[in-house]
Each structure stands twice: as structure tokens, then as C-alpha cells.
Amino acid sequence: MWRGRWRSLGSALVRVILVWAVSTLTMLALAGLLPDFRLRSGDGDSVTQIGLTAAWGAGAFGLLSALVWPVLVRALLLVPALVLGLLVFFLNGSLLLLALGLIPSGRGEVAPETAVVVAAVMSAVASATSTALAVRDDEAYRRRLHRLADRRRRRTRHRGAARPGEPAPGLLFLQLDGVGYQTLRRAAGSGLMPTVAGWLDGSHGITAWRTDWSSQTGASQLGILHGSTFDVPAFRWYEKDTREVVVCNRPTSAAELQRRAIARTGDGGLLTLDGASRGNLFSGGADQLALVLSVSARRGRANRSRAGYFAYFRDPANAVRTALSFVAEVAREIGQSLRSRLREERPRVARGGMYPLIRAFATVVERDVVAAAVIGDMLAGRAAIYADLVAYDEVAHHSGPHGRDTDRVLARLDRTLALLARVAEHAPRQYRIVLLSDHGQSPGETFLGRYGLTLKDLVRAGCGLPVPRRAGRTRSGAEARAAVLAALHRPVEEDERGQPGRGPDPVVLASGNLGLISFPDLPGRASRERIERAHPALLATLANHPGIGFLLVDGEVLGPGGAVARLDEPGAAEELLARFGPGAARAVRRTDAFPHVADVMVNSAYDPRTGEVHAFEEQIGSHGGLGGEQSRAFLMWPAELSEPEPDLVGAEAVHEVLRRWLREADGPQVPVAAPETASTADPPGERVEEPRPRGGKSGSLPSAGVSARDEIR
């Protein structure tokens, strides 16, 4: 035993010396290349003296980075994440200046702006060297994983939840946001995603599942994580009782939707026990949170959503690597946008302003932080992890769901999956990786681009209200924009965020190719007769427009040419909506029963030959309504798990499948105690979510019912 410990200590000492040596050489090289950085006294030094100065400076910088850096970053945890990413460079440069100040005789000297560059390069080189040595030393890597697992076992025993034998397999749920069933099959078959292709060829099965009418992340992820999509008619909608607009990617709205789902199901969520939620709109009841929108509006210590930023940026090399990738992605987007304009590609939407930065955040920063958080979760042995990777969805909105731009994003996502799979092989428990999506994407020119006016303009014309001479653009409401604003501690920018007053002007909202029209001056849900009395030409104007597929008005579906189908007449709606795919009538009928369904629901036209729809937002790849690939998501599972039922319909059905897989992984379930009789497995102060209500569906993975602090290293 002592021999093993001495061998471990010796191996660690060798790695430290090697990293120190490489850092010293890096500092010497930078001193020779940069004119504002020197490692010698004014009257000159020997080569040996310069080398010793570099070694002293590199050692002091490494020691300060190890001891002081984590404290600095944690102190700045409440600073907006993107600001923290920039501060990293200045803080790192400050540590270098301090390290050089510790060199005897004042031999180290560097200009402040050069110190930022030197510190960034040295951090990156030291991190790369340390990683390479750790990869080569498999035994050291296994020992580290063993220590993490052993630390978790001791913590579990301390809380009275010990369980003999090997831990049950964990489940890692990875959501590829916006990747439809056909898109994934095409990418795997063409070699774009070799990791996914390998899983499909051997270890995994796959099936498609149909979304509800509201084919968007807010509804789907709420259903997957919390088991309810009830009363979520779209991405954004107007509620007459509160006179407010609810937007799924607004933190306050996301928190309210999560609260409603928990109250309806009587259950805390899929991840209630020993779960981790990473990069999602909703928490799923998890204790461990990072980049979760429903808690991002909270302030103070109770909000652990931004803890993922600290865990990631505590290593300055991560900040350097992510910053360089961020800049490269911004340049890539600008180049791709310019190429699209020069080639006069159609359809096309504006991609200027803040969009290059938003895209880079979604495809680089959020991807890196979420992946690092998932790696930490696996190394800590958490039982259930759910993470959302939003890169494809964001790029597809502006570049279209098929093409060179999105193909490159899919290839990078596949590399992330490969990395997570490799880490899972060394985790202290076995992990079964489930891959799924929340919806797909349907291509098509925007409603404004095809017809020269927005849905709001068309509605105002049908109501006899003045229409602006110049059609305005409807802001794209992609999830990544909200993630950026949450990272900056700013409210989500929404034109409809105010409280529309009562009056004749209708409230017109867009959710992809689904539009919602509400009349604040008509109490309750307006019937067709009341709408036609108030605005005689509106419904006919909408139903007969070539860009409109159908309307839903108080239990009736209106189509072009005066076609009408009542939802309570068997077969009538199925016939009218047949072109929108199987299950369209069922989805419309379900939405019609929601308390907050709009007075008029508008679905754009759909061409079954091309699969195209017309988004009412500025998106040439869209989702949110019916028509095409947007309604066909996928679910991919390892062979060890039971097959899901064929023809899955709705996110709630997917939730039940995932719960069954959790039960299969951990055996019979133990109901979770009500808040007043909570067990010792959930000590006071450990939770950041609402108390778990009593319910039969509560309690997945009770053997791991302990929360654990983040250990992302």
C-alpha cells in the first residue's frame, strides 16, 4: 500500500515538474518574441540567470493560478457570464504581473497589455501539457476517478443512504435541439456524424415521435422533463386573465410554466433525485443546475444556474480556448452570411447586428460549458443527467435546416458526443446514453419575404385598422437569444413584453409558422360570431390568403374557399387537415381545449411536395406549428433499455418512456415523502426547486437520492 502511494506521489511530482518545465520554455520563447516582455536586468544577464528567472516566474504564475484563481472567479460568480469570460483575460494578466513582481532583483518586466497575451498563452500551454500527460497516464486517470467515486460513497454513507454493491447504471439524456428524425438519419448515413452512425449500427435503436401542435422547445422540454404540456399553446401567447404575454424563453415565464406543470402532475420532475439539468429551459427538479433558464432570474446564493460558468472558467485555459473558438465562429458566420448574399441565395434572412455573437455563444460558449458540466456530472457519478445542445437549432433558423452551415454544426456536435462517450467509459458508474430531440425544423421562405407583409399587417388590414406603409420585421425568438441575455443578467428582449391594454387593437404573436391573435376587448375566448360581429372581414381575409393553411376559432377549423370543419364532428377535421400529416387533427383538437388558447390560431400554408412552410418570424428554418419535419423529433436509446411503444405522440409520452428507463436502471421505486415528512436524503437547504408534492410518479433513482456539489475539474 505504501509503495503504491509513493508511486502515485512520484508520478504526480514528475507531472508537475514537466508542466513547470514546459511553462518555463514558453515564457522564455515569449520573452524573445515580444518586445514589451523581458526577463533580465538592465545591464544584462547570463543565459543561466535568464533561465532561472523564467523558471521562477513560471512557478510563481502556476502557483498563483492554482491557489488564487479559483477564489477570484468564485468571487465574480454573480458577474454576467459573458463579462466574466472577458474579465478572465485581465485577471489572468494581473496574476502574471504579480508573479513577475515576486522575481528577485526586479528582472521580470512586462507591459500590462502584453501581460494579458503572455498569461493566456502560458495558461493554454500548461493546460494542454497537463491534459496530455494525464491522458498518457491511464493509471493516474483511473485513480482520480476512483477518488471522486470514493468521495461520493463516503458522502452517501454520511447521509444514511448507503447501498451495497456496484452503483446502478446512470442515464445521460442528451438533447440535440431542433434536429429532426430525418435530419439525424441523413447526417448519420452521409458520414457527417460517425459517432451517431456507429451507435445506430450496433448499440442503439431509434424511433421518431410526433410533437404536439406547438412544436417548439418550451412545450416539448416541459413535457419531457415535467410530464405536462397542458396549456402551452405556442412559444408565446397572450393571457387575458393576467393581460400579460407569456414567452417560453423568458426566465419569469419559464419559472411560471414549471410551477404550473409541477402543480398539475404532483411531481417534481424527471431529475428529482440526484439529477443534473444543464443548458435547459426547465430544471426537471434537479439539484444540480447550470444554464437553466427557469431559475436564471433568481438572485443570490439560491441560484446555482450560473455555477456552470464558474466551474468552467476556473481554468483560465478554458477561457482562452473558448474565446479563440468564439472569435473564429463569429468570423465564420460573417463569411457564410457574405457568401450567401454574394450568391443571392434564396430564401435568406438578415444575419447582421448581434446575431453573429448570439450564434457564437450558442455554438461555442454554451456548448463548452454544458459539455464541461456533463463531464463533471459523470465523474461525480450522478444518476440522471439531462443536457440540451442548442447549436443546430440556432444556426438552422438563419441558414436553413439543410446545407453547408448546418452540416458543419452537426459534425461538431458529433465530436462533442464522442468526447462525452469517452469520458463515460471512465466514470465511476456505467452510463447509458440516450439521444433525443425536442422537435425538427421545416424550411421555407418567411411569410414577409414571400408576400411582402407580416401577419400583424394582414390582421390589421382585415380588421380595418391602419397598416404601416413599410412592413416591419418580426424578431426571431430563438432560445439562444434568451440564453445570451440571461448570461448578461438582462431581461429577454420582447416587443410584446408589456401588458397590452384593452381596446380594438388585436394582439398578434408569432411562434414559427404558428400565429396567435387575441382581442383584449373581448372577454374570455371569443366565438366566431363575436369576432365576425366586431371584425366582419378578418376571418375570410385570413382563411383565403395563399400563405395561410388553416385557422382554429373556438372549436372550428377554417380553411380556404370557405371550408369549415367542427372538431366535435368525427372525421371532419381529419379530412380538412390531412395534408398536414397524421395526427394533425388530434393535435389541433387537444390545443382547442387549453384555457389560454388564442381567439384565433393561425397555421401557415404547407407544401407537402417541398416540405416548406412560411414562418411568421424572421426564420428560414422554423418550428412551432404543423407541417413537415418540424413535428418529427427522434428518440435514440441503448439496447440495454426496453423499446418504447411504436408511434409515440407528444412529449408527455416521451416523459413516460424516460421514467420507465430510470426505473429499469434502478429497480422498484420508493415514493418521495411530502414536504412535511421529507426524508433525510433531502436535507433542508439542499434544494433550489419547489418542494416535491406528493404523487405516485415521484421518485426516480432513490438509491442516489443525495445532492452533490459540482465537481467539474
Image (spheres, grey):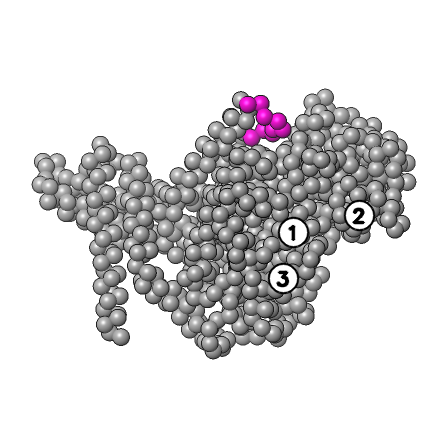
Residue with the most extreme front position: 201
Q: Nearer the viewer, mark 1 or mark 2?
A: 1
Q: Is any atom of residue 551 visible in this view?
A: yes
All told, the count of numbered labels is 3
Q: Which residue is mark 1?
A: 208
The residues tagged by marks 2 and 3 sit, at their Cα atoms, a distance apart of 27 Å
Where residue 567 sits: x, y (%)? 85, 48
The residues tagged by marks 1 and 2 sit, at their Cα atoms, a distance apart of 19 Å
Give the residue type that dot 1 points to: Ala
On the rendered structure, is 70 left or right of 549?
left
Q: Residue at x 70, y 31 (%)?
A: 447
Q: Residue at x 41, y 62 (%)?
A: 426
On the rendered structure, is 1 left or right of 85?
left
703 lies above or below 386: below
Q: Which residue is mark 3?
A: 643
Binning the other alpha carbons within 10 Å of mark 1 as few (below 14), some (14 to 19) or many (20 upward) gives many
Q: Earlier in the sequence, mark 1 or mark 2?
A: 1
The residues tagged by marks 3 and 1 sit, at their Cα atoms, a distance apart of 12 Å
464 lies above or below 601: above
On the rendered structure, is 656 left or right of 301?
right
In what quadrant of the picture does the N terminus appear? bottom left
Q: Nearer the viewer, mark 2 or mark 3?
A: 3
Q: Which residue is mark 2?
A: 585
Magenta highlight range: 343-351
Q: Residue at x 68, y 60 (%)?
A: 645
Q: Residue at x 63, y 34 (%)?
A: 620
